[in-house]
Image (cartoon, rainbow, N blue to C red):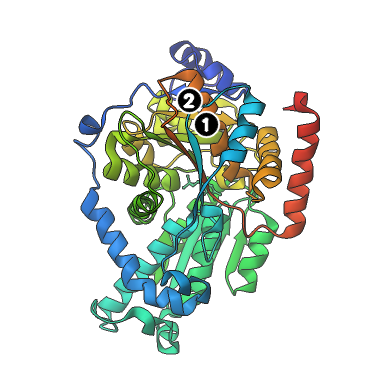
Amino acid sequence: MTTIKGKSIEEWMKKFPDLYPILNYIPFYWNNPYAKNDKEAFQHQPLQLKDIQDAEERLERFAPFIAKAYPETESTGGIIESPLEKGDRIKARIEAITGQQIPGTFYLKLDSHLPISGSIKARGGIYEVLKHAETLLLENQLLSAKDNYRKIAGDTYREFFSQYTILVGSTGNLGLSIGVISAKLGFRVIVHMSADAKQWKKNLLRERGVKVVEHVSDYSKAVEEGREEAEKDSKSYFIDDENSSDLFLGYTVAAIRLKKQLEAQEIQISPETPMHVYLPCGVGGGPGGVAFGLKVIFGDAVKCYFAEPTHSPCMLLGMMTSMHNAISVQDFGLDNQTAADGLAVGRASGFVGKVMESLIEGIYTVSDEEMFRLITEMMDVEGIHLEPSAVTGLMGPAYVVQNNTRVTEKDIHLIWATGGSMVPDDIKQADYQKGMEYKNNPDAT
Ligand SMILES: *Cc1c(COP(=O)(O)O)cnc(C)c1O
């Protein structure tokens, strides 16, 4: 009989009855029993506000470089940020689909439209590459922290960086972000792509001169290959999506930016009328970093939820069982096969689950059919194309209203729409059509 960490599946199910729907791919909301209030949760955290501020200051130093290297960011002074928009129309559609009235106002955080790489990975991935570049330049006395970083866009620097290699393992979007910014700086770049990675993402990277290594296996293996290759060469730097605190910090900066956007739009939140934030989760760094930053800045006025595919609920299994990255969805017989390539991760990050277990309210799962249907609804009513991973946040509010707490008309539901603007038109069309079929035949979902 196969056992998982010494227990049979039956024993695990007995201990955690919620495993029944999860192991049968049935969409499910899990209320996190390990959640703590703000004060308790922050007693033992490894990262603090000053770490987030340090990351934000680094991005400010690089802003003149970004503005020069990417003219589309000139209007924001080289700050890579996404719009915050109201989502009244999609809210009405979600209420109709779920049959659930949802008190409160919907907002969409459109990371799908982040400049440079069109996904949430533009936060963490680009940040870590910039930090590494800065470290190399400072070590080699080619830069002082007081300089205007605009000059890094010049050929001298490209030549310097060309001696160095950056490696990463990815399901697609992280490779895209890191590949694009690294190639721009002049680094050699090698991206190990898992089998889920979409062809267009590989093509785009190759066009930019990035070496793409394709794997027939899943994301965890792609990461391992990248890590091993980097160890052989002292001028290679591996960006470790499973363990990197720099990636995580890059994502946390979103909270400082969001605070300014909320103020500008006069959106008020409080512990009594909180903002519920719904974040699609793969390995956990992106949603974990954003949620961590939000909790540091807003405390109990923010409540965070992660969304995962029914086929890849790695964070949910890890957190529920407290086994975190010691187990994978495959250990429990799940197949990790999903159209949500950004979330097609079988094993969660080694540290994110532990950091977040006291800080998030719950995790829920979404079926692939539901994702396509939501892509079509978003296009129809908001005119915004999102990729399958990025729509999963939309299912959250109905679950929250059904499953827990008091949700008032003054609450805010912030759906983090994590990617999609760079999807090629023919694929956008195909996704839309697929969603149309499910919409016309709801029993299929
Ligand atoms: C990567 C990704 C996520 C999740 O981020 P993780 O750090 O892997 O948890 C969500 N949405 C999209 C579109 C992504 O590419």
- Disc tally is 2
Q: Quadrant of the N terminus?
A: top right
Q: Amino acid at mark 1?
A: Gly
Q: Which quarter of the figure has residue 59?
A: bottom left
Disc 1 crowd rating (10 Å Cα; few below 14, some 14-19, many 20+) is many
Q: Nearer the viewer, residue 370 or 218?
A: 370
Q: Amino acid at mark 2?
A: Val
Report whether the residue tagged 1 is closer than 8 Å to ligand 1: no
Q: Residue at point 37% right, 47% down?
A: 266
Q: Residue at point 63% right, 25% down?
A: 98
x%, y% of residue 262?
A: 38, 49
* Left or right of 257 in this view: 190: right
Q: Taking 296 as reference, is 14 above or below it?
A: above
Disc 2 crowd rating (10 Å Cα; few below 14, some 14-19, many 20+) is many
* Left or right of 40 in this view: 58: right
Q: Nearer the viewer, residue 263 or 153?
A: 263
Secondary structure beneath dot 1 equals helix
Secondary structure beneath dot 2 equals helix
Residue for badge 2: 400
Residue 396 got which mark? Answer: 1
- What is the CA distance from the residue labelled 1 to the residue labelled 2? 6 Å
Q: Quadrant of the C terminus?
A: top right
The answer to whether the residues at label 1 and label 2 have Cβ atoms under 8 Å apart is: yes
x%, y% of residue 354?
A: 33, 35
* Left or right of 23 in this view: 297: left
Which residue lies most toward the front here? 266
Q: Is residue 280 visible?
A: no
Q: Nearer the viewer, residue 44 or 441?
A: 441
Q: Residue at point 47% right, 13% down?
A: 11
x%, y% of residue 172?
A: 58, 55
